[in-house]
Image: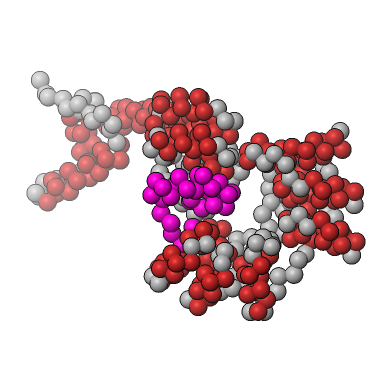
């Protein structure tokens, strides 16, 4: 009886074809006559099939089954990941703990953001959501303090904790050894560390979050001057078309020194209606509207939201009331998420625990219905 070999556990039709071609080539080097069809037949008989066509059909079916099993496994992991993200945003620590216990690998998986674009890890979302219980659970379960930030525009957990003013989380990440690279050092206002980092030209090569320049993240005049001395352009825009001086103007009065620096370098940072609304400068907003500024003007970057969206997101009830009194459209939709200012206030309240957004949401909803 002819001995029959067992197929590998995961047979590959591509591999079998390559094997047949290699055998043909080997036989021809030996001066023997050989065709690919004959070699296919011999290979099929070797594995117990009467023809290459039968072997091919069998392997193709096994490959389809394997692909279906892989897809099902991936769907299961993705479903668990989605549920874990929902547990974070809904502050269901018990559910999150159960999911991580069942699937420990989820803790450092990156996947779709539960609210907007990008593919963060769970630690990123816990920080954004100001969910300290989830934050600690994730770290204790093995979450990387530095994160995998390739699909989240380069934003690391440490950067997010600084940006969102999660001081306790920031300190804990640093205590656990988070890497303080250039952008984080700039955001921390750590001039000494910044000086040490920019001494290495590689630190200035990027890319940086939001396709911005390091100057966008400068918090002190000393660091800004140091970056300028190393050739960083002050007029370079980020992905939203906003320059560093314009970004500094959005943070008045905390960036007063940087704004004076920009003015001295000829980079004007006049306050427009967008900046005034973002900063909650009620008197300035009223003056600009009286001077003819469009109450339904939209931001040119980001979600193309209206002024009312921005004020609602910030939980700024005085500015919201003023804009509504001046004719702001309560039903206007932003162009990214297609949601109203009231919805923005609700998301800021639910997702970021911004309590000042609750009266804003109620005020707008009462006006709408």
Q: Is residue 334 left or right of residue 108?
A: right
Does 304 appear above or below 227?
A: above
Looking at the rendered image, the quarter that the N terminus falls into is top left
Residue in the image at 68% along x and 76% along y: 263
Magenta region includes residue 285: no
Residue in the image at 63% along x and 75% along y: 261
Q: Is residue 283 left or right of residue 77?
A: right
Q: Is residue 113 visible?
A: no
Q: Is residue 145 visible?
A: yes
Does 272 appear above or below 264?
A: above
Which of 142 and 121 lies nearest the eye of the viewer?
A: 142
Mostly what secondary structure, the magenta segment?
helix
Looking at the rendered image, the quarter that the C terminus falls into is top right
Rendered location of residue 241, percent (x, y): 65, 64
Magenta region includes residue 172: yes
Rendered location of residue 357, percent (x, y): 73, 41
Which of 180 and 24 lies nearest the eye of the viewer?
A: 180
Residue in the image at 28% along x and 33% along y: 11
Does 77 appear above or below 144?
A: above
Q: Which residues are magenta?
A: 156-184
Q: Is residue 210 left or right of residue 281?
A: left
Rendered location of residue 247, percent (x, y): 64, 63
Residue in the image at 87% along x and 62% along y: 287
């Amino acid at each position: 009886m002819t001995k029959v070999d067992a197929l590998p556990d995961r047979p590959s039709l591509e591999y079998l074809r390559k094997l047949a071609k290699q055998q043909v080539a080997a036989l021809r080097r030996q001066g023997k006559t050989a065709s690919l069809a004959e070699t296919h037949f011999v290979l099929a008989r070797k594995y117990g099939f009467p023809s290459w066509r039968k072997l091919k059909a069998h392997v193709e079916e096994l490959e389809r089954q394997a692909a279906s099993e892989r897809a099902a496994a991936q769907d299961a992991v993705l479903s668990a990941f989605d549920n874990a993200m929902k547990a974070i945003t809904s502050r269901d620590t018990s559910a999150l703990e159960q999911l991580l216990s069942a699937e420990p690998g989820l803790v450092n998986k990156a996947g779709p953001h539960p609210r907007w674009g990008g593919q963060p890890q769970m630690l990123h979302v816990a920080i954004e959501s100001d969910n300290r219980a989830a934050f600690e659970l994730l770290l204790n379960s093995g979450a990387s303090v530095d994160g995998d930030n390739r699909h989240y525009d380069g934003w690391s957990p440490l950067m997010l904790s600084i940006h969102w003013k999660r001081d306790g989380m920031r300190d804990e990440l640093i205590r656990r050894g988070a890497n303080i690279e250039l952008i984080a050092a700039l955001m921390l206002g750590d001039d000494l560390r910044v000086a040490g980092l920019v001494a290495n030209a590689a630190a200035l090569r990027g890319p940086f979050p939001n396709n911005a320049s390091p100057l966008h993240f400068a918090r002190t005049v000393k660091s800004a001057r140091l970056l300028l001395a190393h050739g960083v352009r002050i007029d370079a825009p980020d992905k939203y078309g906003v320059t560093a001086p314009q970004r500094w103007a959005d943070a008045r009065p905390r960036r007063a020194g940087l704004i004076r620096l920009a003015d001295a370098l000829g980079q004007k940072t006049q306050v427009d209606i967008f900046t005034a609304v973002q900063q909650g400068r009620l008197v300035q907003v009223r003056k600009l509207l009286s001077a003819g500024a469009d109450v339904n003007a939209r931001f040119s970057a980001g979600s193309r939201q209206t002024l009312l969206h921005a004020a609602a997101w910030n939980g700024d009830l005085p500015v919201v009331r003023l804009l509504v009194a001046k004719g702001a459209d309560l039903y206007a939709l932003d162009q990214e998420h297609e949601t109203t200012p009231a919805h923005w206030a609700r998301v800021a309240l639910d997702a970021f625990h911004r309590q000042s957004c609750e009266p804003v949401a109620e005020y707008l909803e009462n006006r709408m219905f």
